[in-house]
Amino acid sequence: MSLSFLLANRFRRGKRSNRYISFVSLSSTLGIGLGCFVLIVLLSVMNGFERELRDRLLAIIPHAELFSVNQQGITDWQAHRQALLADPRIKDIEPYTKITGMIQQGANLKAVELTGLKISADILPRWQSAISPESWQRLRADAGQVLLGEGILKKLSLEVGDKITVVIPAVTDDLTFAAPKNLYLTVAGSVNVGGELDNLIGIMHLATASEQAGVQSGAQGLRFQMTDPFVAYSVIREVGYGFPQAVYMSDWTRTQGHLYDDIRLVRVVVYIALSLVIAVACFNIVSSLVMAVKEKQSAIAILKTMGATDQQIRLSFVYQGVINGLTGVFWGTLLAVITAPNLSSIVSTIEGWLGVQVLSGDIYFIDFLPSNLQVADVVITVCVAILLSVLATLYPAHKAANVQPARALH
């Protein structure tokens, strides 16, 4: 064991005799530990939100859309679909027709956006988290059935089997409104995507929707699911600009991208803020070591007269600060690694005790606090905390190495 390390342990034991210096040293250790703990846990929460966004919301909503600018729809959409599926970036393409109208239930009205899809077993796995198998079977059995968002059913007090009237606006060739059309449907079940979508969404049969919307080709547009959702912006524009007929283009970053942007922004803000908290805790290391240098000037001077080099004195104080930092980093990281994977269940338990809900499913696309611990976040946090701890020791260590024996022992 080196002389510097032995001196660091001896000086640390000496600090315990001075309660004020000991308190400052302990507060720095606790501050670093708390900063590491909170930073890792909050980064895990941000990772959890990003995972849920990708696996829940982006598994259901289309990553991109092409839709016709006129009522004719996408001409020969079957051939276009087969050709576009040859692109490895595109996972799946499905035809759709969208109808915007008002559900009239007694004296109540509710806006709805009905999406007509080809109701088949092939697309069920993508919707299984939002639609129950029983509702799906009822929808497949009858072209006059419809699935409505959970929020719509609650607002209008609708149940399975209820008849509804959807008022659809009619537009003439000269873009003037004619008398609206009424579409009569039967509620087959609910769609539970989460968030505001549950107050707007509806799913029905493609043929019924196209017939009511007057789409001649059978499909108003094409919905794309990408292998990687984050390439949707570039891929849909590449496809759209080369499409043989006039179409509008849209992607999930335009409709739901604010959620992802918010997650990234909060992640950056959290990292900066809590890194500063760790930095402030490291300033306490500076304070405690400066006071220790002041208190141990005589001991340092004696060590120098006995042959201790400036480098050995400097390293002894660096070791003191690093030990404080490593202690805080170790316990903070250990608690975070234990807590983060179990955060969802911990928060659910606390919600049950207090009778409150942290996230409301009516507002957010999930109703629980997600968490996804990643090794990279732990490694980066630990490295940043240790680096700041080392930097905090440089000034006090330099000050200790510059103690002049003749002046200190005068």
Image (tube, helix red, strand yellow):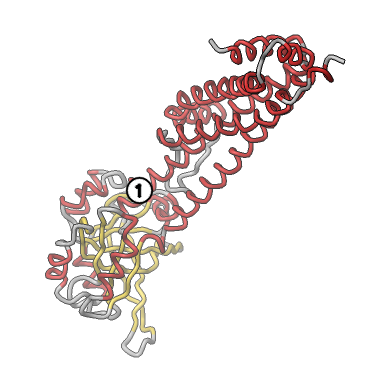
Q: What percent of the width, then of the height, locates residue 51?
A: 38, 43
Coordinates of residue 337 in the picture (x, y in percent)? 45, 26
Quarter holding residue 368: top left
Residue placed under numbered mark 1 in the picture? 54
Left or right: residue 233 compared with residue 218: right
**Which kind of residue does numbered mark 1 sit on?**
Arg
The relative height of residue 298 versus residue 123 in the rendered view (above or below) is: above
Q: Nearest the camera: 368 or 337?
A: 337
The answer to whether 143 appears left or right of 405 in the picture is: left
**Which residue is drawn at the image coordinates 15% and 50% (left, top)?**
121
Please tell me in which quadrant of the rendered image residue 156 appears. bottom left
Of residues 131 and 155, which is closer to you in this image? 131
Q: Position of residue 361 (x, y in %)?
A: 45, 45
274 on left or right of 295: left
Depth check: give the residue in front, 360 or 77.
77
Residue at 59% x, 38% y is 274
The crowd level at tag 1 (other Cα within 10 Å; few <14, some 14-19, many 20+) is some
User: Circle 1 sits in a helix, a strand or a loop, which is it?
Assistant: helix
